[in-house]
Image: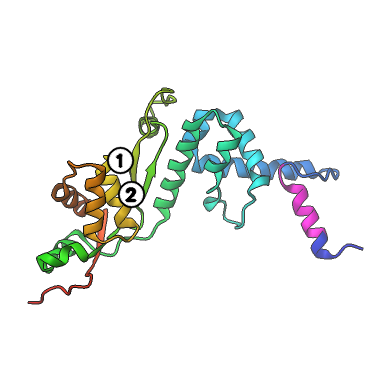
Amino acid sequence: MRSLLELQERFAASLEPGGATRAPGIDVYRHAIGANYRRALAATYPVVRELLGPAAFGEAVDAFVPAHPPTSGDLNVYGDAFARFLEQHAPNRPDARDMARLEWAIDESARAADGACTPAQIVAGFTLLEEDAVAQVTVHLHPSCRLLRTATAIHAAWSARQAASGIAAPDEGSAGELLLIRRHAARTVVERVRAGEFTWLRALQAGETFGEALSQALDADAGFDLERTLAERVHDGTVCGIEPGRYNPRHG
C-alpha cells in the first residue's frame, strides 16, 4: 500500500506537463497548470515570446517545465534557466536566447534591493580621500545593475517592444552588444556601453579596487574616459557605494 507522501508525489507528477499518468479527468488540471506556466513565463519573457511566436514559445515552455521544475510556489521568480534551455531547444535562434538572458536580467534588476548611498554621499566620499588612496578604494554598483555580453544585437528589438512599435529579429550578421541593465526612478533602463566602460563596471562589480578596474578598462579601450564615466555613473546612481582601502580617508 502506498504511503500518503507517495500518493501526493504521484498525483503532483501527473499534473506536470508531459506527466505520464492518464487518470480520468486529470487532463483538465494538467492543462490549467500548463497554462499557468505559460502565462508566468510569458510575463517574464514577452519579447522572447514575440520572437519565437506564441505557438513555438508555448511548446518551449511545455518542454522546459519538466526539465527545470520550479522550486518555489512563486512563479514570478521562476525561469532563470530558460535562456540556457533555449540553447538546446532552439539552437538556430541565438537572438531568442540572448533576449531571454536580457529579460531575466531585467526581471532580477526590478526585484533587487535599493542602493546604499546618494550621489552627494559618493562625491563626498571621494573628496575625503587622499590622492594616493583613491586607487585602493572599493566602489560598489547599485544592487540592480546587471552586465550582459550578447552574441547578437538585441537592444533595438527590446527598445522597439517598449515603444510598442513591433519587433524584428536582428540581422544574422549583426554583432553582439555590451549592455548595462539598471533600475532608475522605479523603472528599468537598458543601455549599450563601450568596451572600456563595460570592463570597468564588471571589474568594480567583481570587487576589484578602483585602480585595478581602471587598469582593466584601459586595456580594453585605451580611450576610456574615467572622469566623464565616473561623473555620469555617480549622477545616475549606478555607482552607489565606496569603501576605503588600506589607506584611511583624511578627516576634517
Name the element at disc 1: strand
The residue labelled by disc 2 is: 182
Vertical placement of residue 55 versus 241, above or below:
above
For the C terminus, which image quadrant? bottom left
Determine whether the residue tagged by mark 2 lies in a helix, strand or loop.
Answer: strand
Q: Look at the picture and state if 111 lies above or below 41.
A: below
Instruction: State left or right for residue 161 relative to residue 93.
Output: left
On screen, residue 54 versus residue 189, left or right, reads right
Side of 141 where 12 appears, left or right:
right
The tag earlier along the polypeptide, 2 or 1, is 2
Q: Residue 191 carries which label?
A: 1
Quadrant position of the N terminus in the picture: bottom right
Pointer 2 local density, CA inside 10 Å: few below 14, some 14–19, many at least 20:
many
Dot 1 amino acid type: Glu
Among the 4 quarters of the image, the one containing residue 244: bottom left
Q: In which quarter of the image is residue 61?
A: top right
Can you say whether 43 is above or below 158 in the image? below
Q: Which residue lies furthest to the bottom in this view?
A: 252
Type of secondary structure dominating the magenta stretch: helix
**Does the magenta-highlighted stretch encompass residue 1?**
no
Q: Which residue is drawn at 38% across and 44% down?
A: 148
Whether residue 185 is visible: no
- For the record, the magenta segment spans 7-17
**Residue depicted at x 49% and y 32%:** 94
Residues tagged 2 and 1 counted as in contact (Cβ below 8 A):
yes
Can you see residue 242? Answer: yes
- CA distance separating discs 2 and 1: 9 Å
